[in-house]
Amino acid sequence: MTIALRKPDHEESLPHEAGGIAYGRRHGRGAQTNRSGRFEARTYEPVDDGWDSLGDLEALRTEVQETPARRIITKNDSPDIGFDRSINPYRGCEHGCVYCFARPTHAFLGMSPGLDFETKLFAKTNAAQALERELAAPDYRPRMIAIGSNTDPYQPVDRRYRIMRRILEVLSATNHPVGIVTKSALVLRDLDILQSMAERGLVKVALSVTTLDRKLARAMEPRASTPDKRLEAVETLASAGIPASVMVAPVVPGLTDAEIERILERASAAGATEAGYILLRLPLEIGDLFVEWLEANCPDRAGRVLSLMRQTRGGKLYDAQWRSRMEGDGPYAWMIGRRFQMAAERLGLDKRRKLRTDLFTPPTLPGQQLSLL
């Protein structure tokens, strides 16, 4: 059932009293609306009847709920990603990247993948303790843990919660390898731990750079670090001896794909030794959210962007097929991949560094019997 709602006279009742719909534009937020999740019995759509202006609205505050985790390591068997386990210290992400493929996970909580995803967060405050328990299991075998593959571990609220630092302390103490992806210069807060782990071959850090255009980045990724700050972070990491790379992700056809070579050149100059890319993915609710964002922020390019997206996804906005979901298919997707490959090879960014697993030492929990060997 779809219910159309006229914008109410009193904006302060929004968004939840109006069925989860937000009207107008919210400063510092990526999503335009709070569309209902796919599991809800009713969906709500805003309708402007012409009596009121749909202009800027008051800023939404970020709410954080502290949620203890029973387990913190998530396993996967996806054939098209380079890791089989990951950690997500938070559910939801304050960066507000409109294209974030993690947004649909908020639907499992009865919340919107739109504004709820970036304003209603869940912090796994016992993540470090849960990690210690899992690493201490007799049958645990170490392999690289990916952090930042879903929501950003260094999103703004981590300045207060410092969950990521405590996780790194556990990984460092046990000599466990970790690969980090982030859009935040906050990663430099933990430079001391990262440098120590790098000396043992246990860590690599990737900064995700979608565009070098500050204005476009602020619209797409409103609370992430600016592109320049991310590249400065790459330079600082590399100077400290920490393997640093850049993810050109996501590549948005017709909007950011023209910048591939320039991003890689800036990354190489900053000291990056690796690079990767992912074509824009729009699973489930993200398709509607991204179309709304395009029409609000890039109306002159929206038609071309959506047309090119369909050309790379077999006529659809998204195709979830293994392997092709990351790079797309068709001539335009091939051209993006070939351009990236040629630039990465020219700049020496096509190498892949393996992390060590042979140094791993399981933690000893209180009351646990020490090994005799």
Image (cartoon, rainbow, N blue to C red):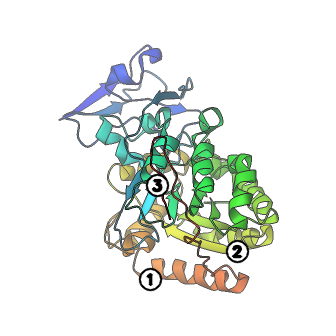
Query: If the image is split into quadrants, where does the N terminus sit?
Result: top left
The mark nearer the N terminus, 1 or 3, is: 3
Q: Are marks 2 and 3 in contact (CB under 8 Å)?
A: no
* Above/below status of 26 relative to 327: above
- In the rendered image, which residue does mark 1 sit on? 331
Q: How many discs mark residues in the rendered view? A: 3
Question: Label 2 amino acid?
Answer: Thr
In the foreground, 229 or 306 = 229
Label 2 sits on residue = 273
Direction from residue 265 to residue 329 in the image, left or right: left
Q: In this view, does 344 lie above or below 149?
A: below
Label 2 to label 1: alpha-carbon separation: 29 Å
In the picture, residue 255 is in which quadrant?
bottom right
Q: Which is closer to the viewer, label 2 or label 1? A: 2
Instruction: Give the Cα distance between marks 1 and 3.
Output: 45 Å
Q: Residue type at mark 3?
A: Leu
* Residue 23 higher or lower than 362, as above or below: above
Categorize mark 3 by other alpha carbons within 10 Å: few (<14), some (14-19), many (20+): many
Q: Tell me what residue is drawn at x 34 percent, y 48 percent.
A: 285
Residue in the picture at 63% in, 64% down: 203
Q: Name the residue under label 3.
A: 135
N-terminal of the pair, mark 2 or mark 3, is: 3
Q: Which tag is nearer the camera, tag 1 or tag 3?
A: 3
Q: What element carries label 2?
A: loop
Instruction: Name the side, left or right, on which 78 lies relative to 171.
Output: left
